[in-house]
Image (cartoon, rainbow, N blue to C red):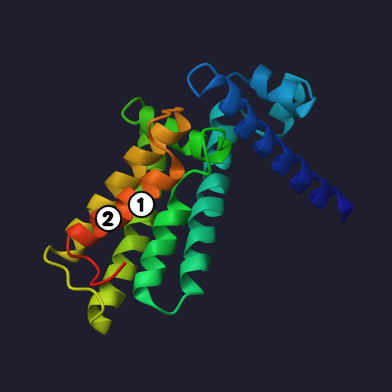
Amino acid sequence: MARPKKQDERRADLIEAALSAVGERGLRSLSLADVAAKAGLTRGAILYYYEDLDQLLVEAHRAGLERFCDHRDAVVAGIPEPQLQLAAAIREGLPSGPDDALMRLLYEFDVLAGTSSLHDELVERMYRRQLATYTGILERGAAAGVFAPTLPVETLAMNLVALEDAYGLHIVAGNSLITVASAEAAMRAAASGLGAPTTL
């Protein structure tokens, strides 16, 4: 009975190694050898758990998506006021800084969109989760009368996701002109300017 648990632990270790390797090497030039070096294993050992690098990256993306989106949705769910939910969603949706390996991986998949159906599927999966988070908050706020949107909720949600992605990409790219704090402040100001909340 211990063997499946051991395999699950090894797969989790390989996902962490892949995230770390992407942070250092980038997704375009990543190889199984890079991940193996990070994990302290041979390339053949990785192929015991994953049939190729793409399969490992799909699992890394899935784990990253769950960690990012599930965590944010849990934070939002624990807050009763829609305006505070929106502020939390904005804060939790941005990278922690240029060295955020998880967000770097997610954004690198965005850069590769259009190069394969696999990358397209993964990018769209994340976008749908981001959109659902913002749409839900805006709809709840409008229903409660604390938001007074002047644009359709769907449009506001799309704009917030676009801002989140744009600022996040600048942050992980190391743009010194855009900090996490300034990006968060700009998104909150944009939400107010778009007529989303009455107060934010």
- Check disc 2 and give the amino acid type: Ala
Q: Quadrant of residue 163?
A: top left
Residue 71 location (% of width, % of height):
54, 59
Q: Residues within 10 Å of mark 2 (few under 14, many from 20)?
A: few
Q: Please indicate whether residue 107 sits to the left or right of residue 192 in the image.
A: right
Q: Looking at the image, which is closer to me, 122 or 160?
A: 160
Q: Are marks 2 and 1 in contact (CB under 8 Å)?
A: yes
Tell me: 46 left or right of 189.
right
x and y percentages locating residue 120 in the rendered image: 35, 36
Q: Which mark identifies residue 125?
A: none
Q: Quadrant of the C terminus?
A: bottom left
Which numbered tag is attached to residue 189? 2
Where in the figure is residue 13, as x and y percent of width and height?
A: 73, 39
SS of the residue under disc 2: helix
Q: Which residue is mark 1?
A: 185
Q: In the rendered view of the protein, which quadrant contains the N terminus?
A: bottom right
**In this rendering, is residue 71 above or below 177?**
below
- Residue sitting at 67 percent across and 38 percent down? 16
Three-letter code for the amino acid on which mark 1 is drawn:
Ala
| Residue 118 can be seen, yes or no | no
Residue at left offset 85%, top offset 48%: 3
**Residue at 23% from the left image edge and 82% from the top image edge:** 145
Work out whether residue 58 can be spotted: yes
